Amino acid sequence: MKKFKLLLFAIPLLTFSCLVDDDALQIEEDLSNTPFVVGFNNSSAGPAFLTDGQVNLFSENIVLFGGNDFSTNPSITVNFEVDQSSTAVAGTDFDFVNPSQSVTIDADREFAKLDINFYSDVIDVDNPKTLILNITSATNGEVADEFRTLVITINGICFSDIGGMYSVTTTYGYHDFLPAYNPQTTDIEIEALGDGMYRVFDMSSGLYSSGPYADAYGTGPTSFDVVFTENCGEISWVDQNDPWGLVIPLEGGVNSVDPDTGVVTISWFCEGYGENGVSVYTPL
């Protein structure tokens, strides 16, 4: 009687084992018939490049998302095109490293790089252009609709390079020795400190370092030493001082770089006693 019961118990186990094997075989068969699916790794990208005239290489992956259980895959060539709504222009703003506008995912690999050259000298920092790419087809595979399009926004970071020697003419609005010593011209270096930061040893064009303030008040070469920033043609500074107080941008004054001539104009005001002037730096 016990032997009969054991035999009955073993029959369901054998039946369940057969069902599991059948399901696994069906899943494997389904996967083997699934097409390879490809697409962009991202739907958008926003690279940023210094506007220094360099050619910048940008890469985005086209990836194999699924198909055939990833056990093996053939070589897959993916073709793409530029969407007509793009504002970036080929040959002006960018070029594809592979002009055929295709990339190939090699056999048994899961991705390939799409390489693009962007030209930094034409980037508009204030109005970035977009390059929109659409995958059109894939040999030996299909394209995932949700990863078919890539929108690239071409951002720019202003390149700053105004360091060097200048002839500086300052027209003073007020100081203790007017109308004498006005205007004053001298040669001054704008010293580059890196990352768009600069120093001038005497923003007063000599009034403090060698002019009447040096004799009357004991000021010297570093009494009007000012560090400022140039970003996209705009000059600014904070927390700078003369011996008697803060030095700030002159209200309503010009603080900028002329992009065509390289002339730098700095308009300054001393809060301590009201000295102020407009200094025009002409490159030597």
Image (tube, helix red, strand yellow):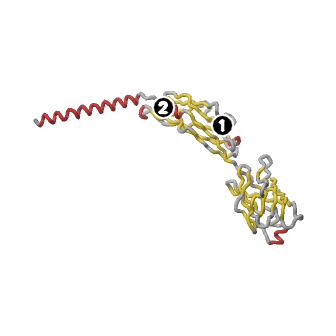
Q: Residue 60 at what x, y percent from top left?
A: 56, 39
> Quadrant location of the C terminus?
bottom right
Q: Residue 222 at what x, y percent from top left?
A: 75, 66
Q: Which residue is mark 2?
A: 37
Answer above or below: position of 164 versus 110.
Answer: below
Provide the secondary structure element on which disc 1 rests. Answer: strand
Answer above or below: position of 112 versus 263.
Answer: above
Q: Is residue 222 visible?
A: no
Residue at mark 1 to residue at mark 2: CA–CA distance: 28 Å
Q: Residue 41 at what x, y percent from top left?
A: 53, 38
Residue 159 tag number: none
Q: Residue 163 at what x, y percent from top left?
A: 74, 55
Q: Nearer the viewer, residue 211 or 176?
A: 176
Answer above or below: position of 109 versus 126.
Answer: above
Which amino acid is tagged 2?
Val
Position of residue 4 in the picture relative to residue 145 (left or right): left
> Quadrant location of the N terminus?
top left
Q: Quadrant of residue 34?
A: top left
